[in-house]
Amino acid sequence: MSTAPSPALRTTAPRVLSAPRSRCLETGNAALDAAPDKEDMSSPNEQEGADEKPAEGTPADHSSVQESETGLPKESPAGGEQEEDVEQVETDTESIADDLEEQDNTQVSLKEGKSPEKEEKKISETFFYSYEDIYSRPFVTEDSGIPINLLTLKYSFGYDCIRSVNLMVMDSQSLLYVAGNQVVILDLKTKSQSYLRSSSGGGIGFIVAHPTRQYFAVGEKGEEPNLIIYDYPSLKPYRILQGGTKKGYVFGDFNHTGTLLASIGSSPDYMLTIWDWKQEKIVLRSKAFSQDVYRVTFSPDNEEQLTTAGVGHIRFWKMAHTFTGLKLQGALGRFGKTAVTDIIGYVELPDGKVISGAEWGNLLLWEGGLIKVELCRAGHKPCHNGPVSHIVLDEGELVTVGKDGFIRVWNFEAIDTADSVDETGLLEMEPMNELRVGRNVSLSFMSKIHDCGQPFWYAQDANGRIWKLDLTFSNVTHDPECLCTFHSGRIEAMSVSPMTYLMATTALDRSVRIYDFISNSQQSEIKFKQGGTALAWAPHVVNPNGSVIAVGFEDGVVRIIEVYDPKELPTFAGRANIRNAEINLKQAFKPHTTAVTALAYERNGDVLATGSKDKTVFFFAVEDEYKPIGFIHVPGPVQALQWSPPSHVASMLLILCENGYVLQVPAPLPEKQDTASTYHIKNLPTEYFHFYSIKSRIKLEEEIALRERKKQEKEKAKLEWIKQLQEMGKEVEEEEPEEEEEEPLPSIYIPEEPSPILCGFYSAPGKFWLSLGGYDSGFLYHCAFSSNEHQEDPENRQDEPFEVIPIEGTDDNPIHQISFCNSRLLMFCGMQNGALRVYPLQDKDLSVNTLKAYWSLSVHDNDYGQIRGICCSYDDRFLITCGGDGNIFTFNILSPEDVHEELKAKIPPPRRGLEKEKAAEDIEDPNACNIEEVKQKREYERIMKEAEDKKSKKREELIALRQQFLFLLQKNQELPKHMRLQREQYEMDRRVFEELNMQTAQRIQLVEKELAWEHEKHLIGLQKLQNWFRDSLEFDTVIVHAIQSNHQISTYRLVAISEKYYQDKERPSWKKTVLKRAWKKKEKRESIRDRKPRVVKREADKLKTKVRKPTTCFIERKREQIRRLVEKSDKEKAKIMKRKEEWEKLYKSKPSDDYEDPRDVQAIKEVQENMGCYKLKTATDYRVPQEKYMNTEKKTMQLASLEVLIYKKKVNMNKQIMSLRDFKVSIIEEIRCLLQELKSVQAALDISERLPLPLIPQLHPDEVPEKRFEYDRDILLKFKEEQAAKAKLQEQLEESPSSGAFRYSLKSSDKETGSLQQTASSDGMKRSSSVVIEQQKIFVIEKAEPTEMELEILKREKIKNLYLQETLINKINELVTNFDAELRFLRHKKLQLDVQMKYADLNYITWFEELLILKNAEKNENLLQGHVNTLQSEQEAMQSKLNSYLARMEDKKSEIVKLQECEKALYASFQASLGENNEFAHFLTKVLKKKFNCVKKKVERETDEKDESEEESDEESSSESDEEDSGSEDEIFDISVCPENCDKALFQNTIQLREKLLDIKDALIREKKVAAKLRKEYNVLFEKAKSIEASLNTAEKELDIFQWKKQQKLNDLYVVVPLKLHQVWKRSAVS
């Protein structure tokens, strides 16, 4: 890197930049003079003890010379931000070392004291960098001869308004914003622009102004990007900060005093860095979050507090001084009950609180890392209808900016002291003032500036505008002023005029704009209902004036517009304030159903081709009015269209599809296309090319060639080595070459989804170049259509290119646009990363050599600014590019700007008669039909009209024939009877009717087949409805009515009870009863029919006997009645006398008033003695007995048992009611049979003697509810007619008069035929009746007079029939009366059951309320009961342990007693062996008691004592020492030697007894120790048992208290107590 010395700035400390291109500093070699020695670096040992004093800052450059000791930070952990309440992130004072990655894992502080020699050098306040040395320049291939100034930026027409913050106000006349790789400084007065390019060419992340407006910071993007501070207004680079992030900066902010700068990095590190920017040092740094962070700001009132916010989080930071230095502590905000939201706008309040916006438009007040309250407007309306994008605290007022286009001002004091008033956490508040900026406004950011002492705000509109706002809200407040307007979002298409320096652009913001790129101004704009997606300026051959533009839109519409100069119109001549250009809609048509992606005019200007995502290409004949020719279908969505150039013989259209297909078709001729029924062109010759990936094969061939080359180089080196050895005279032994194992070659890979075709163009007839994205990027592919005339199916084709050119640096950065200048000497390529490439073409043909050298410049945004269009001006002086970032740039092509001062764009003149033309009809409905659909609709309407005309003619013919037939029928009726034709004679051929009937049956079958699916569907639906609503019913409501009264009784409507509570599976249901009734009816009917004749016969026999002896029967009947009356009176008298005797006896046995029954006295006494103390449940000292504890399970079972009992009662009553209904059905059948018999009897009686017939009772509809679900064909047809009638009422269909007349004629003819048939039938009936009357008259005349015997017989028959008539009527009345009596009796029983059921329901309600209380208390009760159970189990276990220990202690005690008895026995035997007056008794006694250290016994004791505790061993050792000490006193006795004159046998016996005594004592000691140990353990367990018992008592007491409280809650429930009327009366009397 070259440098230039600067003695004036020799004492400063400049930085050496790691720029991608050659750069130099103004100060030159001053960096070497200012660098300290390496010995100044402190050792790691010194650094470990340097944690007491925080560092002031360290330099942030990447040079090898460090000016101070490094203090590297610890990175905050990335995971778990959402899990912890507050996360502390501590970062020590640091500086950047050579390896930035080690900075995230190391922490070192500077030493407390420094010598004066080690003080770091300060950067001078007057030090500046040179902009010429740091800005990124174009890349030019070495030795290519391409001039570096091939293209120079002329003007920027776009604005990246989608960026959240892309507007900076330095003064009242200058605005700064980012445009791709440039910072644009716009002068509002002159509209002139100046630019600052990025230093790396990787793009710009953010811009932010210094509080003094003297500086502004530009954070760039790319690998290890720079953060550059520029001076304003000189625009000199003042400071360059490095090492703050890895890939790019997102946002930055100065503190209130301007001494510190905070920056936020993008993915992957999201690094928060605090800079001492004037010294280019990092003060603190930490990872901000694990997801995207949008903003970082300093608190204006406390510079040690910062806030960051982004995707789903907000974080509050503090710069804290700790004993290890200055650290960053970050606390993550917790949303709590509030939904997590992305936070875009927020502001810090003076008291430390933070106000932030939410995605749904409300404001969140944060305090202490938590949401204190959520603010909304009255009625819970959001503060903004959409996200809150920016919040500002200005002069004691809180200003919020929303995406809804509103700016609202709020009372700051009310918000600062706000608090939630209910559980929702919402607080309603209304703004003090509000401003609606305009319609379709989406505000993102706002900045304040003072102009002539008055505050103004400049606002960024995401819909492509910059506003100047006055927020003073006074009487003189200015209206919002739109300063600039741009496209919103990416530019979809662009084209230039073939005649002048005009360009047209369109985007999804629904606008088409015309720009003059000579005067750098927008000339005109027009808005539509849908966004534009394609655009083409008509060539000179189409419109010599160059005023016609074709624009395609996202709804498939193509609009032809024309640009003209309105000043040349006669109506506007002489007017002022007329725009320079106007846009007029000339024609609109819709050839496609989805977005139009390509437009192309044929080279002769005769045809316009349009392509769309709907996989169609439409052709139009270009005339004064565009007329459709036809369309073709293509295999995929259309990406681009290109007509063959004039150098080709035939005019062919190249169609590029996104999914890898390329087609070539000739221009269709309008006169050869038949468009009568459709616009689809089916016979157009089409050539196909289906791209097959060969990139994997190319890579494989390159790998094979590379390995072969390496092998050859290795062989060559080996041969040279052998030659050198031979020259040195050494023998070379030939060794067998070792075969090295090579890595396997990569396999051929073909992507599953074809790579998308991005662009392409013709190279020769039938040949073309393609640029692809995805896997196949990195090459330009030369392809050709197959010459085979009979091409196979396009989907099965696999066509490969015949030539491939690798393009440098395009594997991950494919070419999206390719364009040529008019002379085809330059090829322009638009890249995916927004870069612009220029390839000089010498031979006008592409080859590997011609595409080696190129010129490249990063223009648009590197992340989302892919170039969407490249165009050259008609004279090749200018180049225009547009990108996905919304920017439009114009460049000069190898020409200085002063030459262009004489150039001027000319607006095309208007057409003649334009002012008189009517406005063209536009297509505003996005769902409107396209051209083909309109054609098909018209064709369908035409066919339907022809069919309707034919039908109407046939109907007229049928009407005429029907009229003739009716006329013939009338004539036939007028003829005499013997001359009339019968109806059957009109049938000429019976087979015709048979054929018609057969056709009708076939049609019915066909309809049934067609409707089979629908029938099955509705049947399943009906079954589902029945399963859901009816199958769950055990009994439906059946109401049985009385016959002679208004009494009625109804069943209980019961739902089937769960098998869990009711296991009786044989219970009948009302549905089963109904099903049984079907077969029972037949049996009853048959039995009734069989029985009734027998009854009638019996009655007739009785009648005969009675008729024979009427006087005798009457006398006997009277006597029987008198006898019964006498017997009845005797019984009554006897009953009265008996009752009198009983009363007298009762009065005699009546006791005195003071008499007490001894049995009652004894019973009372026993009760008083034995009765316990029963306390009321409401008493304070009442304790619920354990056996009466009520829990949820018991109460549930109680409710279940009650429910089952209720169910059984209701089922039983329902069965009785259903039996009563069946009884009614049988009675009706019996009455019907009796009436039939009665009618036969009355037929033989005179009319005057006939009694009125009883009415047959009928079943009411609610008595048979199951019939509601029974249907037949008639019911369905009736329902269909009702539905049709409803549909006619709702939809009034217009009917043609012919069809109405036809229906009227049919109706009239039907009426006439019907009337004729009726008259004929009535005549027949009259004739038949007259014949019968005549016959009767003849019969009467011929009948003879009856004899006396016959008269007697007739008289008897008459008496019998009268009796039978009366008997049958009485029988019918008796049946009705009995049924009504049965119904009233059952109704009474049901009323009693209703009372019981009501009691049960009330009880159920009370128990259910108790269940709710028990459920609420169940958790605590279970805990207490579980605790009691645990303690009880512990007590039982402890008691069992105590019992076991007691048993063991008893065993040890018995063993000790046994050993003591043995010891006593041994002493007794010893005394017996001594005898009396033994002189050696004292000696032998000492021998017996003295301890003898027998080796054998000692070893045995040691082996026994291995298992004893340490305490026991200590006791034994002490006892042994005591015995040894005691033994030392009598050392004069030697127990091993028998004294003289002593009996040796006695001595030897004493020795043996001594050994036995020692064994007994040892065993006794052991047993006592074991017993003592057991006692000790027993005592410990006993204490534990006591504590467990105390805990158990406490737990049981707590449980009793809980049960009492639960009982009190149960006592508080209201219980319904039914009272009878006399009880109510008594209660009212008492009160």
Image (spheres, rainbow, N blue to C red):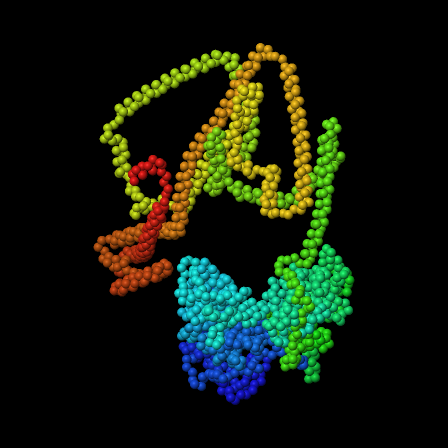
**Looking at the image, residue 1215 lies above or below residue 1416:** above
The residue furthest top is 1348
- Whether residue 1278 sits left or right of residue 1613 in the image: it is right
Q: Residue at x 65, y 75 (%)?
A: 905
Image quarter in which the C terminus is found: top left
Image quarter in which the N terminus is found: bottom right
Quarter residue 354 falls in = bottom left
Residue in front for this viewpoint, 1467 or 408: 408
The residue furthest left is 1477
Percent coordinates x, y for residue 1341 in the rendering: 64, 15
Q: Does the image show residue 332?
A: no
Percent coordinates x, y for residue 641 in the rendering: 69, 66
Q: Does the image show residue 1010?
A: yes
- Whether residue 1598 sits left or right of residue 844 in the image: it is left
Q: Residue at x 41, y 17 (%)?
A: 1124
Residue in front for this viewpoint, 441 or 393: 441
Q: Residue at x 42, y 63 (%)?
A: 372
Percent coordinates x, y for residue 381 in the rendering: 47, 60
Count the labels in the image.
0
Percent coordinates x, y for residue 948 in the rendering: 70, 47
Quarter residue 514 falls in = bottom right
Residue in front for this viewpoint, 1373 or 145: 1373
Residue in front for this viewpoint, 1208 or 1489: 1208
**Looking at the image, residue 712 lies above or below residue 407:** below
